[in-house]
Image: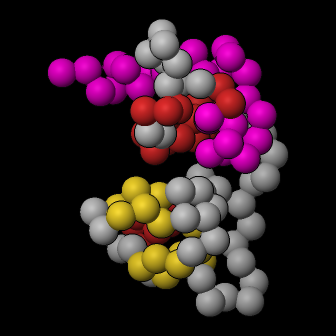
Amino acid sequence: MNIIVKISLQTPDGTVQPGETIKLDDAEAKALIVRGFAEPAGKSTAVKTPETKTDDPDADILAIIDAIAVLDESGFGKDGKPLVKALEDVLDRDISQEQRDQAWKRYEQDNAS
């Protein structure tokens, strides 16, 4: 499926910048669309993705976890945690430090060896 990315996306072939089109398998493309990180390309009526916070706090945390995964080293502070501002830039919306901390804790648990 062809999608237009709304965030910088790291691929094996390099970085895809916001507004650029990329072809991904359907499952990956749909996951990015659902989280608001992309939209389908070539459709006159794009799938609506939530622009504002959802009523499901777990969905917010999952979106922040996904945003953490795409940060480069400049998106992290001296304490090793992702910067709230860097996450807000990826998500294109405000988040709280508490939301960042919850997402970071889950991210670390999910990625522990």
Q: Is residue 32 left or right of residue 100?
A: left
Q: Residue at x 49, y 81 (%)?
A: 2
The one of 29 and 76 positioned closer to us in this rendering: 76
Q: Residue at x 42, y 79 (%)?
A: 23
The one of 8 and 23 positioned closer to us in this rendering: 8
Q: Residue at x 52, y 18 (%)?
A: 77
Residue 95 appears anywhere in the view: yes
Residue 89 position, x and y percent, is 68, 42
Secondary structure mostly seen in magenta is helix
Per the image, is 70 magenta? no
- 103 versus 101 height, above or below: below
Q: Residue furthest right?
A: 52
Residue 35 position, x and y percent, is 59, 52
Per the image, is 89 magenta? yes
Q: Residue at x 62, y 45 (%)?
A: 90
Residue 101's quadrant in the figure?
top right
Q: Is residue 29 left or right of residue 34?
A: left
Residue 38 appears anywhere in the view: no
Which stretch did the figure color magenta?
A: 86-113
Q: Is residue 68 left or right of residue 48?
A: left
Quarter of the picture containing the C terminus is top left
